[in-house]
Amino acid sequence: MKKVLLTLLAAVGFMAGAQANTGGMAWDRAPDRSNDLAALQNGAKLFVNYCLNCHSAAFMRFNRLKDIGLTDQQIKDNLLFTTEKVGENMKAAIDPRQAKEWFGANPPDLTVIARSRSAQGMGTGADYLYTYLRSYYVDDAKPTGWNNLAFPNVGMPHALWELQGKRAPVFETVVEHGHEVHTLKGWEQLAPGTMAPEQYDQAVGDLVSYLQWMAEPAKNTRIRVGFGVMLFLLFMTFFAWRLNAAFWKDVK
């Protein structure tokens, strides 16, 4: 129980970085692909290849990925980099002591990160993650060489930069209520990545959808069962109503 609480606190701390966004950056709506097995499988691949190097998902086992259509053999051949057993938990490859030395803090566990909410009420945890992973830009003044509009002065480097390439934000100045405000106009591509911008957004959407699924793998099953139960109760209510009418039809 103590470990679960520590994980939730770390997740909330990770998400709370959005409060540092003095520009009030609007969060983009994350696509919901929790029922798209192909998207979830691609998201799992991205998570294992780019996130699991530093971040653990200690409350998720590799064999749970069978719920999104993967076989034990596919998991062994393509997703097992930090262990040799499919039944093991998803633990980061990095040494926690090294991570703290390099980044100033141990990267938080991501098992339930997508269920965290913004304290500012600007959207869900998934919306924040979707915006955050698409808001990195080059900043030579930072030790990692990267900064982020959704989480200014973030200590985490851009893990997906090879896919997205290097970008710089383009701002414009507008006057609101008599004050000059700098707003994001767009992005300047400094160096191309291996993916086009649309492909990168698609990949991040798959990754965030996987993080949503990982935070509550039984959610879709729970919704389907709940829908079936409601239909059953509706039918039984109608049946009981008609049965009651039949029992009392001759009573005056």
Image (cartoon, rainbow, N blue to C red):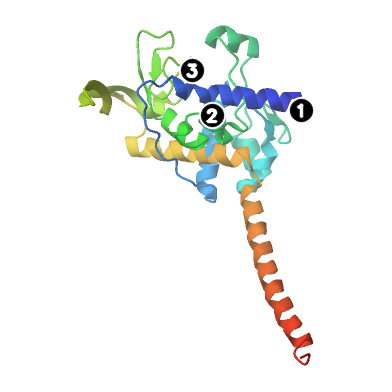
Q: Quadrant of the C terminus?
A: bottom right
Give the residue furthest to the bottom.
250
In the image, taking residue 66 as reference, residue 141 lies left or right, namely left
Q: Position of residue 34 (x, y in %)?
A: 54, 47
Q: Which residue is mark 3?
A: 156
In this view, 192 is above or below 249: above
What residue is drawn where x is 35% and y is 23%? Answer: 23
**Location of residue 251 (image quadrant):** bottom right
Mark 3 element type: loop
Query: Mark 2 or mark 3: which comes first in sequence?
Result: 2
Cβ–Cβ under 8 Å for marks 1 and 3: no
Query: Mark 2 or mark 1: which comes first in sequence?
Result: 1
> Cα distance, mark 2 to mark 3?
16 Å
Q: Position of residue 208 (x, y in %)?
A: 50, 37
Q: Amino acid at mark 2?
A: Asn
> Cα distance, mark 1 to mark 3?
28 Å
Q: Amino acid at mark 1?
A: Met
Q: Nearer the viewer, mark 2 or mark 1?
A: 1
Q: Which residue is mark 1?
A: 1
Query: Who is closer to the viewer here, 44 or 114?
Result: 114
Q: Position of residue 53 (x, y in %)?
A: 57, 22
Mark 2 element type: helix
Q: Nearer the viewer, mark 2 or mark 3?
A: 3
Q: Which residue is mark 2?
A: 49
In the image, taking residue 70 as reference, residue 50 lies left or right, namely left
Query: Who is closer to the viewer here, 211 or 52?
Result: 211
> Can see residue 103?
yes
What residue is drawn where x is 62% and y is 42%? Answer: 74
What residue is drawn where x is 56% and y is 40%? Answer: 212
Q: Position of residue 222 (x, y in %)?
A: 66, 52
